[in-house]
Amino acid sequence: MLKTIKKIIKLQIKGGLANPAPPIGPALGAAGVNIMDFCKQYNFSTQKSKGKLLPVIITIYNDKSFSFIIKEPPVSKQLLELCKLDKGSKESNKIKVGKITLAKIESIAKNKMIDMNCFQIKSAISMVAGTARSMGIEILEI
């Protein structure tokens, strides 16, 4: 029997660190979901990515059950991690805050390809490179 979808919630939660505090508690509580059950399942599923910010799409059904899909970390977070930066540039066209090679951009694109709105690796690389440029990260053509 097919379950009918009541609500879809999109959140960004650190891997392995889900707890009933905001934003998880209020979002799931309003939908009538058992918050601790979600937290336990999410923390178990994300043990390998502990501490990384992970987007998650939670589908809530009419019988108050749920399912969730965990995505790869956002491209901006991956770029900051690789360049060992805290944040991007305020004026990305004037002030450059870091450098990254095209090979590393390609590896991020391959990693994030399943979550992106593109079908070719060339398009994914272009999207990641655009994000890097908008953050003030210089791309080294090696």
Image (tube, rainbow, N blue to C red):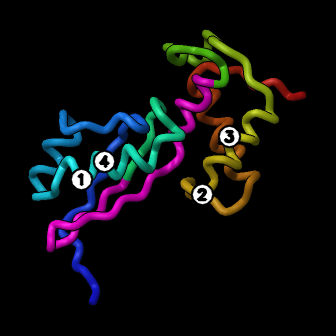
User: Is residue 22 left or right of 140 when viewed as pictured?
Assistant: left
Q: Taking 128 as reference, is 66 above or below it?
A: below
Disc 4 versus disc 2: nearer the observer = 4
Q: What element carries label 1?
A: helix
Residue type at numbered disc 2? Ile
Q: Name the residue under label 4.
A: 40
Q: Position of residue 129 (x, y in %)?
A: 68, 36
Q: Is residue 44 above or below residue 141?
A: below
Q: Which of marks 3 and 2 is nearer the N terminus?
A: 3
Q: How far apart are marks 3 and 2 (CA)?
A: 11 Å
Q: Give the Cα distance between marks 3 and 1.
A: 32 Å
Between 111 and 37, the one lying in front of the other is: 37
Q: Residue at x 53, y 40 (%)?
A: 48
Residue tagged by mark 3? 108
Q: Position of residue 66 (x, y in %)?
A: 26, 64
Residue 118 sits inside the magenta stretch: no
Disc nearest the viewer among 3 and 1: 1
Q: What residue type is labelled 4?
A: Lys
Q: Are marks 4 and 1 in contact (CB under 8 Å)?
A: yes
Please tell me whether residue 71 is drawn above or below residue 7 in the rendered image.
above
C-beta proximity under 8 Å, tags 2 and 1: no
Dot 2: what SS? helix
- Residue 37 tag number: 1
Give whichever of discs 3 and 4 has the lower sequence position: 4
Mark 3: few/some/many CA within 10 Å (<14, 14-19, 20+):
many
For label 2, the crowd category at 10 Å Cα-Cα, with few meaning under 14, some 14 to 19 and many 20 or more, is few
- Stretch of the chain drawn in magenta: 57-81
Residue at 59%, 34% (x, y): give it: 131
Q: Residue at x 51, y 14 (%)?
A: 86
